[in-house]
């Protein structure tokens, strides 16, 4: 479960507020005027999420290739197609 840090606590206590909360729950939610605005994660968890996202993208590309959803074209043709020129 995420712990909450208010923007005011973050402003007054700085990184110490983050360290205290992240030690308890691995992530912290920052609120601004009572509304959830940001999530703070330890770098290891952030990197794990990035790896998961990359793996999902690779799997999607493999699925597209296997199902024939790709285009073979020259660089000039590709630029023209993606820029709608």
Image: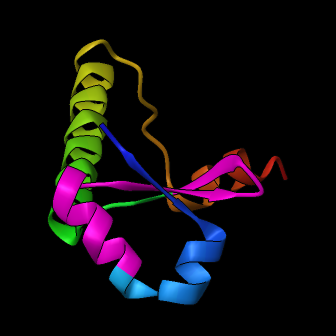
Residue 2: percent from left, percent from top? 35, 44
Of 35 and 67, nearer the camera is 35
Residue 64: percent from left, percent from top? 33, 22
Residue 44: percent from left, percent from top? 14, 65
Apparent side of residue 51 relative to residue 2 in the rendered image (left or right):
left
Residue 69: percent from left, percent from top? 41, 20
Apparent side of residue 34 relative to residue 24 in the rendered image (left or right):
right
Whether residue 24 appears in magenta in the rendering, the answer is: yes
Quadrant location, the N terminus: top left
Against 7, residue 72 (above or below) is above
- Residue occupying image coordinates x 63% and y 70%: 7
Q: Residue furthest right?
A: 85
Against 5, residue 18 (above or below) is below
Q: What are the residue bounds of the magenta stretch?
A: 17-38
Of 11 and 76, nearer the camera is 11
Disc count in the image?
0
- Residue occupying image coordinates x 16% and y 53%: 48
Whether residue 41 appears in magenta in the rendering, the answer is: no
Q: How is the image coloured?
A: rainbow
Of 22 and 54, nearer the camera is 22
Against 27, residue 14 (above or below) is below
- Residue occupying image coordinates x 59% and y 51%: 78
């Amino acid at each position: 479960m995420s712990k909450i840090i208010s923007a005011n606590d973050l402003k007054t206590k700085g990184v110490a507020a983050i360290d205290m909360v992240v030690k308890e729950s691995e992530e912290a939610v920052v609120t601004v005027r009572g509304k959830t605005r940001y999530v703070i994660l330890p770098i290891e968890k952030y990197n794990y999420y990035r790896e998961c996202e990359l793996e999902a993208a690779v799997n999607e590309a493999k699925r597209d290739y296997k199902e024939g959803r790709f285009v073979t074209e020259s660089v000039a043709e590709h630029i023209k197609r993606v820029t709608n020129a």
